[in-house]
Image (cartoon, helix red, strand yellow):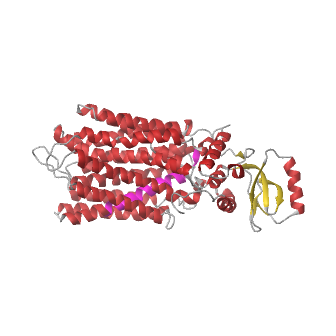
């Protein structure tokens, strides 16, 4: 796209005559909106007429400009629900394992290593899923891979309830994990349709679905697995935990379109992107003809070739990739290790073959994630992505270390509950901001490939965590390891670029184009104000 120059609208006769002559040589029809006397105009849109402050333009707009004009509304809300249900499904499948492993350990007389494998096999499957589904989403599109991933989880998580042997459980959980590996895709779809000013907070709203999913698993476990040594029904527990993913498939099929940003990276498909944006404007109750007239064109975002994992190690992305991978591996180990440590501390298994989970304590500590998400929403656009991650992982490491030490010393239940509550708050606030930061750092052509690759590395951390937490090591040793892993997360995220207030992927744009972003920001600010009527914010900016 040509460089953005700013031209004062008040330069009247000579300026307008020159623009009329230039317009005769250009293709495309006019677009129009109202400017105040002090507003400025982008040179990339040709001026056609000026009457009482009404300016008509012809030409092309970028996908960033189109998304800003679209504003916030029902279009993004439907995508948020579909992506949120996928997030809830991911959280529920992981949380299910912390209960299912302990139940099957007693019912099927499993060893410590076999119990740990029940938790780890899902993450093994997720590695394969991310390595395959992520690049496919960059090559074939976001929506089909989203639907495939959610369908795989739905089918195989339901099939787990019919398993009759240890090996069949492992095989089915592997495929559940394969589907889970594709769940970065709906998150990326949502991130690609949000205006810059609203993106941070609204991407964090999706984390409420994750936390709600975690809490639902505890409720389902309390209802189906029994208490005080009673016999439970783990098969019903697994079925109930699969329901949100089935709903996600239905909502995604009917209400989630292909990503307009992705379409703009595909040769010859920019018009499809504009058609989707026009329909989205109708859903958001924006004046379509006013903001996106039929003669308007949307610019091709990039001419780069399809990406693969090798692109992540090009000169442009090499060090960013290494730092992202380190952060993701560390936070995944820390997050899932914290969940399993809390479950272990509040699990009183009897030698006679019964489990007696302290569901109250597990529910209270899990509800802390809602507070963690709220803290992140409040602070993410105030202190920035990187400082918030550093603070969260630092305090999370200290909290889980203290929890392990106090549990080993036999401290009262309320003391342990307080530290488990704090640990879950900081784990959640840190991890959800890392998700946002990753999506914003990566550019469109490598976003799902890079995001999925980071997710695959995270699964390695998740695979290792159960063997430590569910092994025979002392709680003091586990606490020290968790503190070290959190320190690694702090080191890695502190080296990543800050993305607060930036457009998607612009942290990697060469310095020579920074002036373009600055000028464009002024233009987008006006556009956002011009299209604000009729839009609804999911989270106020």
How far across and down, in percent of the image, does residue 474 sit?
A: 20, 55
The residue at the point 29 percent across, 44 percent down is: 97
The quadrant of the picture occupied by the C terminus is: bottom right
Q: Which residues are magenta?
A: 422-444
Q: Which secondary structure class fits the magenta region best?
A: helix
Q: Quadrant of residue 248?
A: top left
How far across and down, in percent of the image, does residue 393 sit?
A: 38, 61
* Residue 315 among magenta residues: no
**Residue 174 visible, this angle:** no
400 lies left or right of 3: left
The residue at the point 24 percent across, 47 percent down is: 223
Q: Quadrant of residue 403?
A: bottom left
How far across and down, in percent of the image, does residue 308 sit?
A: 53, 39
Residue 332 against residue 253 in the figure, above or below: below
* Residue 424 among magenta residues: yes
The residue at the point 22 percent across, 48 percent down is: 471
63 lies left or right of 337: right
Q: Nearer the viewer, residue 274 or 381?
A: 274
């Amino acid at each position: 796209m040509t460089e953005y120059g700013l031209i004062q609208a008040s330069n009247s006769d000579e300026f307008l005559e020159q623009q009329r002559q230039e317009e005769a040589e250009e293709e495309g029809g006019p677009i129009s909106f109202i400017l105040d006397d002090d507003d400025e105009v982008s040179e990339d849109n040709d001026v056609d007429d000026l009457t009482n402050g009404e300016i008509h333009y012809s030409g092309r707009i970028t996908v960033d400009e189109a998304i800003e004009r679209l504003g916030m509304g029902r279009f993004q809300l439907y995508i948020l629900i579909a992506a949120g249900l996928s997030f809830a499904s991911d959280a529920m499948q992981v949380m299910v394992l912390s209960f299912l492993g302990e139940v099957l350990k007693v019912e099927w007389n499993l060893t410590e290593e076999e119990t740990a494998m029940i938790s780890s096999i899902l993450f093994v499957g997720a590695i394969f899923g991310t390595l395959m589904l992520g690049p496919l989403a960059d090559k074939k599109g976001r929506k089909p891979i989203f639907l495939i991933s959610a369908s795989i989880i739905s089918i195989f998580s339901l099939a787990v309830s019919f398993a009759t042997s240890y090996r069949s459980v492992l095989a089915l959980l592997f495929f559940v994990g394969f589907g889970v590996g594709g769940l970065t895709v709906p998150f990326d779809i949502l991130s690609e349709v949000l205006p810059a000013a609203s993106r941070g907070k609204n991407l964090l709203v999706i984390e409420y679905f994750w936390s709600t999913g975690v809490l639902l698993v505890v409720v389902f476990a309390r209802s189906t697995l029994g208490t005080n040594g009673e016999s439970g029904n783990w098969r019903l527990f697994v079925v109930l935990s699969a329901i949100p993913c089935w709903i996600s498939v239905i909502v995604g099929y009917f209400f989630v379109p292909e990503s307009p940003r992705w379409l703009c990276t595909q040769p010859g498909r920019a018009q499809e992107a504009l058609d989707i944006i026009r329909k989205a404007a109708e859903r958001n109750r924006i004046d379509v003809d006013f903001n996106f007239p039929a003669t308007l064109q949307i610019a091709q975002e990039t001419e780069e070739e399809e990406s693969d994992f090798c692109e992540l190690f090009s000169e442009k992305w090499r060090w960013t990739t290494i730092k992202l991978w380190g952060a993701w591996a560390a936070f995944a180990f820390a997050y899932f290790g914290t969940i399993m440590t809390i479950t272990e501390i509040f699990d009183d298994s009897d030698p006679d073959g019964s489990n007696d989970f302290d569901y109250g304590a597990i529910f209270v500590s899990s509800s802390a994630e809602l507070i963690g998400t709220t803290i992140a929403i409040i602070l993410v656009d105030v202190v920035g992505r990187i400082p918030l991650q550093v603070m969260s992982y630092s305090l999370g490491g200290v909290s889980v270390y203290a929890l392990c030490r106090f549990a080993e010393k036999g401290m009262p239940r309320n003391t342990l509950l307080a530290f488990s509550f704090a640990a879950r708050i900081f784990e959640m606030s840190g991890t959800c901001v890392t998700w946002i930061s990753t999506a914003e750092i990566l550019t469109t052509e490598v976003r799902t490939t890079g995001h999925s690759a980071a997710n695959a590395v995270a699964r390695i951390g998740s695979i290792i965590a159960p063997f430590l937490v569910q092994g025979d090591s002392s709680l003091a040793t586990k606490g020290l390891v968790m503190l070290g892993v959190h320190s690694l997360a702090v080191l890695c995220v502190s080296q990543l670029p800050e993305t607060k207030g930036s457009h998607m992927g612009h942290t990697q744009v060469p310095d020579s184009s920074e002036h373009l972003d600055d000028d464009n920001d002024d233009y987008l600010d006006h556009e956002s104000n011009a299209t604000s009527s009729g839009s609804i914010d999911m989270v106020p900016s």
